[in-house]
Image (tube, rainbow, N blue to C red):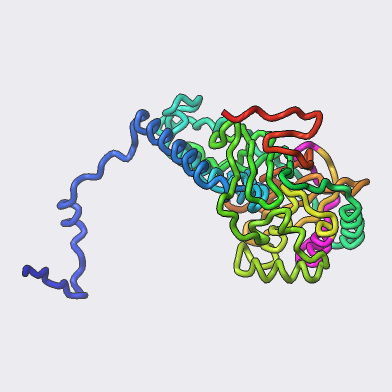
Amino acid sequence: MIRTPRRRREEPLDHAELTRLLPAPGDPELSSDRLNRLEEHLMTEIRNRTSDTASDTSPHASADTSPEAATGAPPAGAHSGDRAPRPARRPGRRPVLVGAAAALVLAAAGAAGLAGGSGGSGGPASSGRAVAPPAGAVPAPVVQVVRGTTAGLAGAVADISGAAARAELPEPGPGQFLYVRSEVSWLVSWEGADGKSRSYVDTIHPREVWVSPDGDKGWLMEPYKEAVDRDGITLDDPEGGERTLNSPSYDYLRTLPTDPGLLLKKIYDETGGMGNGPDQQAFSTIGDLLREQVVPPRLAAGLYRAAARIPGVVLVDDSVDAAGRHGVAIARTDEADGARTEWIFDRETYTYLGERTVQTRDAEGIEAGTVRGRTAVMDRAVVDAVKQRPAGLGDAPPSA
């Protein structure tokens, strides 16, 4: 056996000699044809993985979610720059796999000049010109961050929970489906040819989800997303996995306690060790349940009252959802990244309108005031089949 003499600890490495022995490094720049093939391969992998795991996906996404989050998302997002919501499992994470893979593609595109190499309007990275942002992305809006306060929080929560308890929401029957239609937009991860990150978001677009009461069957339509076919993707779960707070169904929600204290204890117990601390995770869990679900009225009222007991929750006097509707908001800022998630309610009826995530301080290349994600719930209904819409909206296209 040939043994390599062991170098004594005090003998320094001769780096100059090693450099001469090693071959010269190759040119790291890929050809435009190679970049095109890489992009096509990545997008094919996204579509394949999305089809294989659609039953586990859903917008920070969200933004936070989330929402940015992936809508959303990106939810339902790209989820993405923000953690995105998950239909049927964690509503609103737009599917998570889609968002994460899309963010990977976009980051690669910005760093390597992929947009320029594949026919984008920008030139290659080596040219010094800015690479075009992702298709469909627009600069993220920047708003004045309104200070939140605990003053008036208790009264607002009493009004909101009271309205939720009185709500006449549809009750699904055997073989029916819960339908939720939203408008969503989530943060897009993108880095320009100059190496600087810029805040872009999806153009606000529709998202529709159909889910059976037991959560085992469903459908998602979000044709704006490249990894989601125009006809949509299945959310069926043939194995019918166990339902939890992070994998809920309507039938599961009906089993939860409605007392705020018992609810909050269950949420802390089940989500311990997740997310950016127990308080933020508890708030995010409640937000996920509200974003893309039909929640039984008494449970919704209990969830709002439970949320008000979480440390750091405040009342924001004015917020705007993805449909441009103004309202008051129950909000909490994630101490880890400075993103504040706001649940928005109508000022007069106190009904849930949607969600917004705003950056409260400069962090991770995102400036304070940047709107990382927005959602707006436009319809909640019960229908008889997937891709069937409530009266007046028309039916979705038939399956291919």
Q: Residue at x 42, y 33 (%)?
A: 40
Percent across and percent down for residue 368 are 68, 49
In this view, which residue lies farthest toward the left? 1
Q: Is residue 228 magenta?
A: no
Q: Is residue 319 magenta?
A: yes
Q: Residue at x 56, y 30 (%)?
A: 135
Percent across and percent down for residue 396 are 68, 30
Percent across and percent down for residue 331 are 77, 56
Using the image as rendered, state which of residue 204 and residue 396 is in the foreground. Answer: 396
The picture quadrant where one finds residue 375 is top right
In this view, which residue lies farthest toward the front? 174
Using the image as rendered, state which of residue 200 and residue 157 is in the foreground. Answer: 157
Q: Is residue 121 left or right of residue 271?
A: left
The picture quadrant where one finds residue 28 is top left
- Residue 365 visible: no
In this view, which residue lies farthest toward the bottom? 9
On screen, residue 132 above or below 252: above
- Residue 313 visible: yes
Q: Is residue 14 left or right of residue 330?
A: left
- Residue range highlighted in magenta: 302-324
Using the image as rendered, state which of residue 247 and residue 321 is in the foreground. Answer: 247
Quadrant, the C terminus: top right
Count of numbered circles in the view: 0
Q: Residue at x 73, y 56 (%)?
A: 251
Quadrant, the N terminus: bottom left
Percent across and percent down for residue 127 are 42, 30
On screen, residue 198 above or below 248: above
Q: Residue at x 71, y 34 (%)?
A: 388
